[in-house]
Amino acid sequence: MQFAVEFYETASGQCPVRDFLDDLKKSDPGDFAAILAGMKKLQNRQYHRPQLSKPVGDELFELRHVGKLNIRVLYFFMKGQRMIAVHAIRNKGREIQDRVLKTAQERKQDWLMRHPQ
């Protein structure tokens, strides 16, 4: 079963996750390649579990890559084997900060309002 990975876009057409990945590609090509490989793996349901992915609450999940800094891409699932990436961060800590989760949840709600199923 293949899942499609889509990126959240704001109402004005900005794509925060794609912007993050573009910057990452320039600054850390190795980490960028690892995140892309992880996203490709997530297209296959067998990888929807830890070490690669885990739930972080409120029906949000994270793709994790441990490198110089931890990189996390937060996403949620939609009907039709779709995954919507809503936020991406680099952090030193093991925990995801509340403000990061809040941003991801707000983007999820915005996406759901503008793309009703």
Image: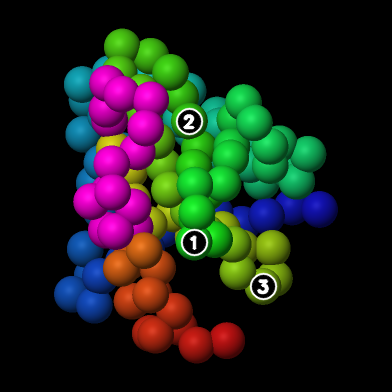
* Quarter of the image where one finds residue 15: bottom left
Does label 1 or label 2 sit earlier along the sequence? 1
Q: What residue does disc 3 label?
A: 79
Q: For label 3, count other residues whose C-alpha is less than 10 Å away and answer few (under 14), some (14-19) or many (20+).
A: few
In three-dimensional space, the C-alpha distance between marks 1 and 3, rounded to whole angstroms, equals 16 Å
The stretch of residues the image draws in magenta is: 90-104
Q: For label 2, count other residues whose C-alpha is less than 10 Å away and answer few (under 14), some (14-19) or many (20+).
A: many
Q: Tell me the SS state at disc 2.
A: strand
Do callouts 2 and 3 mark residues in contact (Cβ within 8 Å)? no
- Above or below, 14 relative to 113: above
In three-dimensional space, the C-alpha distance between marks 2 and 3, rounded to whole angstroms, equals 23 Å
Do callouts 1 and 2 mark residues in contact (Cβ within 8 Å)? no
> Residue sitting at 68 percent across and 37 percent down?
49
* Quarter of the image where one finds residue 23: top left
- Above or below, 66 relative to 56: above
> Residue sitting at 21 percent across and 63 percent down?
14
Q: Amino acid at mark 2?
A: Arg
Does label 1 or label 3 sit earlier along the sequence? 1
In three-dimensional space, the C-alpha distance between marks 1 and 2, rounded to whole angstroms, equals 17 Å
Q: What residue does disc 1 label?
A: 58
Colour scheme of this structure image?
Answer: rainbow
Q: Nearer the viewer, residue 19 or 105?
A: 105
Q: Is residue 74 left or right of residue 79?
A: left
